[in-house]
Image (spheres, rainbow, N blue to C red):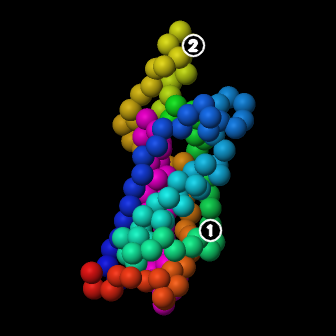
Amino acid sequence: MRMVEAMIRVRMSAHDAHYAGNLVDGARVLGLFGDVATEILIRHDGDEGLFLTYEAVQFHAPVHAGDFIEAHGELIDVGNTSRKIKFRAYKVIQSSGIHDHPSAAEVLAEPILVCSATGVCVVPKELQRKSKGE
C-alpha cells in the first residue's frame, strides 16, 4: 500500500460559531475530515468515493471563531473497495479574544489536538481509475 496523506488549513469564522462564546460546532471539524478524505481518495483512486462511517470520534479541545484549524488525514488500510483513513485536527493559531484588541491572535508554539477519528470510505471497483502501483 502506498502512503497517501492530505491536509487542509481553514480559519473558523463567526459564521461557523454555533454556540455561546463563539464556540464552533464539532460537526464543522468532521466536515473538514470529509474534504481531506475526498482529496486522499482522488489521489489514491482517481475518484471521490463515498464516506461510509466514522469510528472513534473524539473531541479533545474547543474550537472558536477566529481559530485556524489544520485537518490531517492518512490512508491506513486499503480493501477491495474500502479505504480506512486516520484523521487528526489541530488548532495552530488561536484567537486571543482580548477585549481592547478583538482581532488579536497568536500562533501556538505547539498545535493543540482538537479532534481525532478514523473513517471508512468506499470507492466502487468500476470507479477506481488509478492502479495500485501509481
> Is residue 115 in view from this perspective?
no
Amino acid type of the residue tagged 1 in the rendering: Tyr
Task: Identify which residue is drawn at 48% across, 88% down.
Answer: 126
At which x and y percent is residue 100? 53, 9
The prevailing secondary structure element of the residues shown in magenta is strand
Q: Quadrant of residue 119?
A: bottom right
Mark 1 nearby-residue class (10 Å; few <14, some 14–19, many ≥20): some
Task: Identify which residue is drawn at 38% across, 32% down.
Answer: 107
Among numbered discs 2 and 1, the one appearing first in the sequence: 1
Say whether residue 12 is left or right of residue 3. right
Q: Which residue lies furthest to the right in this view?
A: 20
Number of the label disc, if any, that sits on residue 99: 2
At which x and y percent is residue 7? 39, 56
Q: Is residue 84 above or below residue 116?
A: below
Instruction: Pick the quarter of the image with the C terminus.
Output: bottom left
Element type where label 2 sits in the image: loop
Callout count: 2
Q: Is residue 70 above or below residue 53?
A: above
Residues in magenta, as a range: 68-93
Element type where label 1 sits in the image: strand
Task: Identify which residue is drawn at 62% across, 38% down.
Answer: 16
Q: Quadrant of residue 45?
A: bottom left
Disc 1: which residue: 54
Number of the label disc, if any, that sits on residue 92: none
Q: In this view, does 101 lie above or below 52?
A: above
